[in-house]
Image (cartoon, rainbow, N blue to C red):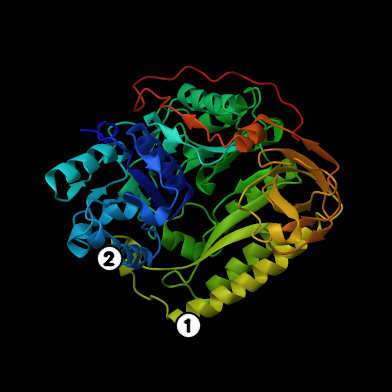
Amino acid sequence: MTTETQGASRTYDVRTYGCQMNVHDSERISGLMEGAGYVRAADADAADVVVFNTCAVRENADNRLYGNLGRLRPTKVKNPDMQIAVGGCLAQKDRGDIVKRAPWVDVVFGTHNIGSLPALLDRARHNQEAEVEILESLEVFPSTLPTRRESTYAGWVSISVGCNNTCTFCIVPALRGKERDRRPGDVLAEVEALVAEGVLEVTLLGQNVNSYGVEFGDRLAFGKLLRACGDVEGLERVRFTSPHPKDFTDDVIAAMAETPNVCHSLHMPLQSGSDQVLKAMRRSYRSEKYLGIIDKVRAAMPDAAITTDIIVGFPGETEDDFERTLDVVRQARFSTAFTFQYSKRPGTPAATMEEQLPKQVVQQRYERLIATLEDITWAENKKQIGRTVEVLVATGEGRKDERTGRMSGRARDGRLVHFATGDLTGIRPGDLVQTEITYAAPHHLNADRAPLSHRRTRAGDAHEAGRAPRTAGVSLGLPTLGVPAPLPATTGGCAV
């Protein structure tokens, strides 16, 4: 018996940890729940079903999950009909151990069977016992599932899942599986469906997004896909994350530079500037190649904003290794960076390596890295003062907006901009404004004069109407055998 047949709709709340892939998976979970008759809870603390979509990358992921599960236990005791489900990477890793440690959990599902969640909830409720279902590989590509999008103006589009790399610090390949690529036509169909709903910006997602095409034997497929996105009428911005330096090719740089709606922003993980550490990490590039890619990107797109990921304190990292990381940071001139202190993940080769560094050494290096980065990002942001930028107005980006009378959004290069509205009224999330940068801080820009222009958009209309985009499954399943139809050719043009 489904929820729809039970009278009053049960409510749900999804709580997400981790990367963009998890955020997008949570959109699918919401779509599945609503397709099964559930309604999003107005009060998250009073939801009939709470779903945790977990991450396993960080060392404290386990503690965070079990702490939150512990806080829900009294609520579950008071209301036995409430259900708790745990999915995502940590569920894929820990499996049945979750219900052993937290026996009040009703459902555990993995990264490969998100679509089973409504049925597992029904089964657990009927049988009055926990249901644990973890698959070892995908049955259907996740994009076949219905999706309740969180944004009216920006959408995630998965082009692949899984990863074929063997980085020694990363547990993701063990939890997400080998790379599986969607057919280009399926990707473009989803992009077009989003644009039809009013979405202006899409971000192409993959664990290693620029290796796209490896499964059907076209190493230039990613660049072709970027160019094809340029032919989608009404699509104003295209982003992608995250590429791997070893697979970054000149044709992708050309596609970025020559396709007008592809943004001049690039997130390319560095991890370390030391060749010795990169070798120990099994990152199949070295610092010279990494910096060479950045030089090519900036030669083709001088305005490009480049961001990165950096890990401090990898086993065996010496002071000299760390200094080499700082050297690369100074040469690369990142606009921002996501920085991490190395933490052991059981099941990864790095967890058993010798020369694990003392916490105080890692902390001290981390603080030095942050200080160096802030000097650079602030200097790079100051170069933006006086420039006119196009801002896609967003929600939730500016925590001080209400107090300061500003609104916030992202420039085409991905930088966060807080802008004054002046005498203009009716600016909505999803609309576009042109404004002049007047002030720079290490992590954001301000535009304190009135906008130069304001363009109302269908995305803004959707936000004003409270209408979140919903997309049905647009793929026929896992990639089929054979070579896909070629992507349409596009002529080059000046990037904006």
**Quadrant in the rendering for residue 192:** top right
**Residue 16 visible to an observer of this rendering:** no
| Label 2–label 1 contact, CB within 8 A | no
Q: What number is the disc on residue 74?
A: 2
Q: How far apart are the two marked residues, 2 and 1, measured between alpha carbons? A: 38 Å
Q: Nearer the viewer, residue 458 or 358?
A: 458
User: Horizontal and vertical percent for residue 94?
Assistant: 24, 57
Q: Quadrant of the N terminus?
A: top left
Q: Secondary structure at mark 2?
A: helix
Amino acid bearing label 1: Gln
| Figure check: 434 above or below 140 | below
Q: What number is the disc on residue 360?
A: 1
Residue sitting at x 75%, y 27%? 493
Q: Residues within 10 Å of mark 1 (few under 14, many from 20)?
A: few
User: Horizontal and vertical percent for residue 239?
Assistant: 60, 40
Q: Residues within 10 Å of mark 2 (few under 14, many from 20)?
A: few
**Residue 454 visible to an observer of this rendering:** yes
In primary-sequence order, the first of circles 2 and 1 is 2
User: Horizontal and vertical percent for residue 52?
Assistant: 35, 53
| Figure check: 326 above or below 10 | below
Q: How many marks?
A: 2
Q: Secondary structure at mark 1?
A: helix
| Figure check: 104 above or below 126 | below
User: Horizontal and vertical percent for residue 143?
Assistant: 41, 32
**Quadrant in the rendering for residue 342:** bottom left
Q: Nearer the viewer, residue 295 or 222?
A: 222
Q: Quadrant of the C terminus?
A: top right
